[in-house]
Image: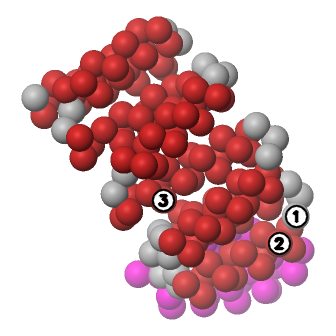
Amino acid sequence: KDLVWKLCFELAQVEERAGNYARARAAYARSAVVCASNLRWKVWLGGARTEVSAGRFDTAAELLGRALRASPPKTSSSVLLDQARLHELSGDAERARRLLRAACRTNPQEWKVYLELVLIELRRGNRERALANVRRALARHPGTGRLWAMLIQLELREGPHEQMRTFQQALLEVP
């Protein structure tokens, strides 16, 4: 049973990549039926990603809601990241920001929610907000190389000397 749900899940992803959304949905449905209830959130999340690819944002939002309700607190940040991305794709960047800020409070151990908050600001052209967010993120996660890399990129305007200083600081912090 453990293997069957995973095979169906993998098949759904293969079908999605091939553009066969109906087959992907059927494979996700089979996967949801046979998987353990504590893993079902992964199926809902995968299905939501497929629906985003298919342009069905309402269905994706419903599946993400199911995934969030079913996911353990420790992994809820994965679902929150997808919810935020969906809201941004739908044109509601402010709601995406609110979700990510909430995720930073509820899942402070997860550096990826901090990074996504920085990326939203960059995509929106808010460099100063992105810079402030990456600095806050590094205060919480000083050993995360991707955050340091983002800070170095954002310091391009300050010039190569400031970027080198930050790089040297990162070398001392990142394992």
Q: Residues within 10 Å of mark 3 (few under 14, many from 20)?
A: many
**Left-right relation of 154 to 169:** right
Which portion, as a residue range, is magenta? 147-175
2 vs 96: above or below: above
Query: Residue 116 occupies which quadrant of the picture?
Result: bottom right
Q: CB of mark 1 within 8 Å of CB of mark 2?
A: yes
> Horizontal placement of 28 versus 57: left or right?
left
> What type is the residue that disc 1 sits on?
Asn
Q: What residue is disc 2 on?
A: 129
Give the Cα distance between marks 3 and 2.
22 Å
Q: Residue at x 36, y 40 (%)?
A: 42
> At x 60% / y 82%, what residue is drawn?
138
Q: Residue at x 38, y 58 (%)?
A: 75
Mark with earlier residue (3, 1): 3
Q: Foreground mark, 3 or 2?
A: 3
Disc 1, SS:
loop
Q: Which mark is residue 77?
A: 3
Q: Is residue 22 above or below residue 141?
A: above
Name the residue that disc number 1 marks.
126
Residue under the point 50% across and 76% down: 108
User: Is 145 left, or right, of 27 in this rendering?
Assistant: right
